[in-house]
Image (cartoon, grey):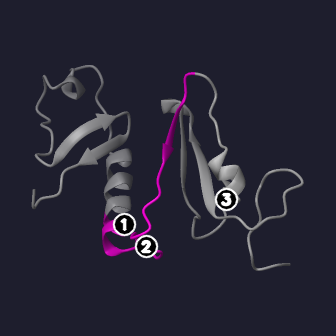
Amino acid sequence: MSPVRRCSRTACGRPAVATLTYVYADSTAVLGPLATYAEPHCYDLCAEHSERLTAPRGWEVVRLSDPSAPTRPSGDDLEALANAVREAARPQDRGDGARRGGGPRTADPLEVARRSHLRVLRSPDS
């Protein structure tokens, strides 16, 4: 078996350079740098197929291409993953309206925007 991961598209044998993931709940296709290891629900794409990618009508395509990003997971990545797991494991009370800002839970002062389970955070320095 070749150590180089190949494009997931049928009959394409070129080396993969990007990973495509679908977030069905948000109708979003996320195309980012090649993942560290192959995931069963992600698609590895070559340069040509990643450039020509289109999403279904009504879906949004998010292209993550940051050449200065570290190739290995950093401490911040691991901390963000741990926080996401903690938040997902926390029981949610949907009846009291706490999610709509009317309850005791307040937004983190660094949180700029939220879309479903994804959050945009502002740097503490800015």
Query: Callout 1: few (<14), some (14-19), or many (20+) C-alpha neighbours within 10 Å?
Result: few
Disc 1 residue type? Asp
Disc 3 residue type? Ala
Observer-nearest of 104 and 5: 5
Which residue is located at x 28 percent, y 45 percent? 120
98 left or right of 92 in image? left
Please report whichever mark, 1 or 3, sits nearer to the chain's N-terminal start. Answer: 3
Q: What number of labels is visible?
A: 3
Observer-nearest of 50 and 74: 50
Magenta-drawn stretch contains 73: yes
Name the residue that disc number 3 marks: 47
Q: Are marks 1 and 3 in contact (CB under 8 Å)?
A: no
Tell me if residue 6 comes above or below residue 87 in the rendering: below
**Image quadrant in which the N terminus is located:** bottom right
For discs 3 and 2, the disc positioned in front in the rendered view: 3
The reply to whether residue 16 is in sight is yes
Name the residue that disc number 1 marks: 77
* Image disc number at residue 35: none
What percent of the width, then of the height, locates residue 76?
30, 68
**Image quadrant in which the C terminus is located:** bottom left
Tell me if residue 100 comes above or below residue 9 in the rendering: above
Query: Callout 2: few (<14), some (14-19), or many (20+) C-alpha neighbours within 10 Å?
Result: few
16 left or right of 33 in image? right
Answer with the quarter of the image where residue 3 lies: bottom right
